[in-house]
Amino acid sequence: MASSSPIERRCRAAALAACLAWLSAAAPAVAQPLDAQAAALLDRWLQSSCLGDEAPALEADLRRNAAALAPALRRALADGPPAAEVARIRETATRRQARRASFDWRSMNVTGVDRSAVASLQRKSAGAVVDDQVRRYVNGWRANAIAGLAIVGEPADRTTLRRIAGSTSDPLAPAAREALRNLAVR
């Protein structure tokens, strides 16, 4: 093997340094753990189903913690809820469906729900009902992340929301459209 010249070695070293710099810049930033208060706020936001009168105060809390919460909301949108939480929801939905399946609806006077809706639910397989409940939970979690990003996100997040809102096949499109409408009002 021929020895390389000092210029060749310097060129290789410079190329290696440039590659390492590019890789470190291209690598995603390591997620910083949230402090307990920000983590509780994030969990409350992502788990909520209807905020009602407390929405303005919670939104203000999100804005105060925007720097920490925006990356966490991006991860929540991309990754969905933790696997353990999805497993808990699946287990709960499975138990609930087992109770429903064993209940005799014929003797009940059901009000507020069309009989055909009850019959339709009874015809669905237990797995289909449970999968639907899990899908709704995951989509709700991610929809809340979208709403949070509309409050504390950066311009790149708005681009993400516009992309989702424009998709005809994404179940999160309505949530993204609503988040963008709310941004326009602010």
Image (spheres, grey):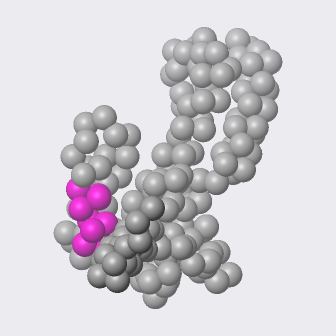
Can you give x and y, in whole percent of width and height, for residue 94 in the image?
74, 31
Asked if the stretch drawn in magenta spans residue 159, the answer is yes
What residue is drawn where x is 43% and y is 82%? 66
Quarter of the figure with the N terminus: bottom left
Q: In this view, does 125 lie above or below 50?
A: above
Span highlighted in magenta in the image: 154-162
Number of numbered discs overlaid on the protein picture: 0
Q: Nearer the viewer, residue 121 or 79?
A: 79
- Majority SS type along the magenta span: helix
What residue is drawn where x is 24% and y is 76%? 186
- Can residue 20 be seen in the rendering of this structure? yes
Q: In which quarter of the image is residue 91?
A: top right
Q: Is residue 180 above or below residue 20?
A: above
Position of 108 with respect to 154 (left or right) is right
Asked if the stretch drawn in magenta spans residue 151, the answer is no
Position of 130 with respect to 103 (left or right) is left
What residue is drawn where x is 68% and y is 20%? 126
Q: Is residue 78 above or below residue 10?
A: above
Can you give x and y, in whole percent of width and height, for residue 27 in the image?
43, 68
Q: Residue furthest bottom?
A: 64
What residue is drawn where x is 72% and y is 27%? 97
Can you give x and y, in whole percent of width and height, for residue 142 in the image?
47, 53
- Can residue 50 be seen in the rendering of this structure? no
